[in-house]
Image (cartoon, grey):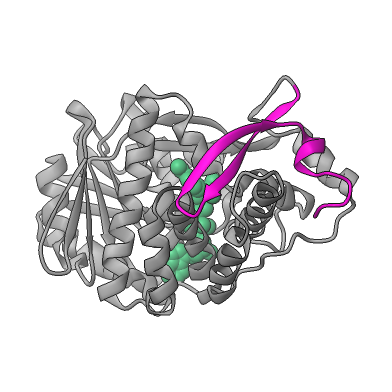
Amino acid sequence: MSRSGSGLERTVHVELGERSYPIVIGFDTVAKLGAEVARRTGASRAMVVTVPAVAKRHGPAVMRSLREAGIRARRFEVPDGDRTKSLRQAAKLYEAFLDAGADRATAVIALGGGVVGDLAGFVAATLLRGLPFVQVPTTVLAMVDASVGGKTGVNLPRGKNLVGAFHQPKLVWIDASLLRTLPPRQRAAGSAEVVKHAAIRDAALFARLEGELERFLDLDPEVLVPVLERNCEIKAEVVAEDEREAGTRMLLNFGHTLGHAVEALKRYRGVLHGEAVAMGMVFAARRSEELGLAPEGTAPRLAELLVRAGLPTELPAFPRRAYLGALRVDKKRREGEIRFIALREIGRAEVVPLTPERILPPRAR
Ligand SMILES: NC(=O)c1ccc[n+]([C@@H]2O[C@H](COP(=O)([O-])OP(=O)(O)OC[C@H]3O[C@@H](n4cnc5c(N)ncnc54)[C@H](O)[C@@H]3O)[C@@H](O)[C@H]2O)c1
Ligand SMILES: [Zn+2]
């Protein structure tokens, strides 16, 4: 991976041999999207998948940009919400795309958050054995996390993300100005993953956030663009390293063991993923201190930054046995132990296999 660019426009090059692709990050750049899609995919036709809230605000500018580049573009709206990531919805898109004349040279473009990216990416991965795919993420979470790494997929009634495929995009186009219409609570939730990347991997980024978090949340391009750039680099680096050194990718799970437990106990209602991850990260940092893995003061420093982002840091008061029950269904469990992600210090994390009882000793929480 390497970077290039000048002024406020940056490119992170994800090096994956033949499947290499650029992540282009800028502000107010949507007018240039069409030309780049044409250049990267060679497509003369595009199927744009989006949700109503995003279509209303950003659909016209995206469609204009594609058409001005000579691409015949059609727009497909799917309902908002994680339930849209379903085989039923994928099947509807297969039919709609084929009715609209999709062939192997048709690009699929995801315009939206992680839900749209995962669903449209899954359709692109599977229809006609794979169509060129472009991500235009519109949430903080999708910009720094979901659009990087090539994972696509849908949910089954029994669980999330159980069906999927790896399908690398030809292009990730991040126009950070699209975040202007994203509700503040969603912006804050996505920033939990930004803090996570800094906490596990980059102490300098963490310090930068301590200095400039408000400017990031207020979408000041001078802060937003380089911070998004660094986050895409971190996610891309970790994903690339994992192909050689098994396990590095697991560090991205920092805060997610307890975070997923909170989401499950709340039945995915009333708490956003990033909010649950914020609580889980503070819990994990406190446990890291108690286990003597991280120096004292690590958890308060992390909590302070998350509070400034408007995120919750205390786990909801479910009984300990409820948490233990939720931890025991953790997908990443092996021989009774969960690969818990501990912090060694701000900027460095480590995998520590622990039993659920050790993660949550009787008094702690
Ligand atoms: N593939 C991966 O590697 C990966 C990684 C992390 C998460 N995910 C997936 O991502 C999904 C969550 O993504 P998300 O947090 O982006 O949620 P989301 O896609 O549901 O978007 C959140 C909300 O913001 C609205 N929205 C999006 N962009 C907007 C904009 N610019 N202006 C106004 N409103 C806007 C949406 O309509 C939605 O209501 C989950 O399904 C998760 O499994 C995937
Ligand atoms: Zn997450």
Measuring 11% from the left and 58% from the top, which residue is drawn there?
5
Measuring 62% from the left and 66% from the top, which residue is drawn there?
300
Based on the picture, tell me whether residue 361 belongs to the magenta stretch: yes
**Which x, y percent locates residue 158?**
71, 34
Residue 51 or 197: which is nearer the viewer?
197
- 144 up-or-down from 306: above or below: above
**Which x, y percent locates residue 250?**
51, 35
Q: Which region is colored magenta?
A: 336-365
Q: Quadrant of residue 155?
A: top right
Based on the picture, tell me whether residue 301 belongs to the magenta stretch: no
**Which x, y percent locates residue 337?**
72, 27
**Which x, y percent locates residue 298?**
58, 59
Q: What is the total number of numbered labels drawn onto the structure image?
A: 0
Q: Is residue 54 visible?
A: no
- Which quadrant does the C terminus fall into? bottom right
Residue 30 or 225: which is nearer the viewer?
225
Measuring 32% from the left and 63% from the top, which residue is drawn there?
227
Residue 324 or 48: which is nearer the viewer?
324
- 127 up-or-down from 292: above or below: above
In the displayed structure, does residue 332 sit left or right of residue 217?
right
In the displayed structure, does residue 237 sit left or right of residue 68?
right
In the displayed structure, does residue 60 sit left or right of residue 4?
right
Q: Residue furthest top?
A: 335
In the displayed structure, does residue 253 sit left or right of residue 110?
right
Measuring 68% from the left and 37% from the top, which residue is drawn there?
157
- Which quadrant does the N terminus fall into? top left
